[in-house]
Image: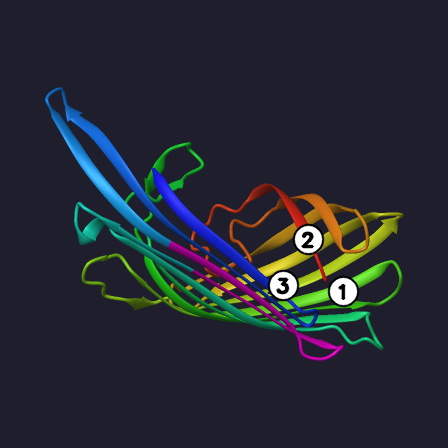
Amino acid sequence: RRARGARMGFNDGDLRLSSAVEYRIDNTETLTDPETVLENERKTWLLKNTLGYQISPDWRLVGKLNYSDSQSSQGQFYDGKFTEGVMGYAYRPVNNDRWNTLLKYTYFYNVPTTDQVLVTTSSTSSANEFVQKSHIFSVDTNYDLTRRWTVGAKYAYRLGQLSMERENPEFFDSAASLYVLRADWHFVNKWDLLIEGRLLDLPDAGDRRSGALVALYRQMGRNFKAGLGYNFTDFSDDLTDLDYDSQGVFLNMVGKF
């Protein structure tokens, strides 16, 4: 593997920008039988960009753009592409900092390479077959009722399409709506208990799933906390995640600015 990269950033107080680019060449050799060696060269461009702009004391604009293009010497079937663009408005009123809201739009396009795999609960792996392009709109809000109790809600909608074919994709609709209600209890100094109820509605698939999530968090300063929890549902609150493998124990870290 040979790679070259560069990174730069800009910060003048209200405006923060950062950008990184990497070009990578991977050469592999696979022994298909005792006398045959299969050689492959993969060339990949990777770009990562982030944006933060303080529009006013109450409003902040946040965004990111991640892009990857991977081309294989074995042909188009082995190529891969990835685009994730996010633009959001964060609202935190200076005169009423008990209320916090994030409005967000995400564009997601993923053509996974044949080397990108999914690990199942049985410790086996299979190729990530879906080509996905999605538009996701979400609103997430929290309100401090008292010094000990915070309530919140999230709604997200995915206008998405999937395809099983890579070279000549034929897309079918995959819309989804996510509903989340949560409560945080600050029951002792620096410790919080989180309880969530979740509902995922998939009208095109004729499916609806619901369940709960619990987590215990430890505050580490004013702007960071880490927690350990358990997700009783098999779906994620990230609507770009199409795999129903999210049930179980998780570790989560939360930062705010």
Residue nearest the viewer, comparing 135 with 4: 4
Q: Amino acid at mark 2?
A: Val
Residue nearest the viewer, comparing 210 with 25: 25
Find numbered disc 1 in the image and state the secondary structure of the residue it sits on: strand
Left or right, residue 59 beside residue 238: right
Question: Could you tell me residue 24's position as x and y percent?
Answer: 35, 46
Q: Residue at x 60, y 54 (%)?
A: 211
Q: Mark 2 highlights which residue?
A: 254
Q: Amino acid at mark 3?
A: Val
Find numbered disc 2 in the image and state the secondary structure of the residue it sits on: strand
| Quadrant showing the C terminus | bottom right
- Extent of the magenta region: 46-66
Q: Main secondary structure of the magenta part?
A: strand
Q: Which mark is residue 180?
A: 3
Q: Residue at x 17, y 50 (%)?
A: 75
Question: Could you tell me residue 106's position as x and y percent?
Answer: 49, 68
- Mark 2 or 1, nearer chain start: 1
Q: Which mark is residue 151?
A: 1
| Quadrant showing the N terminus | top left
Q: Residue at x 42, y 32 (%)?
A: 123
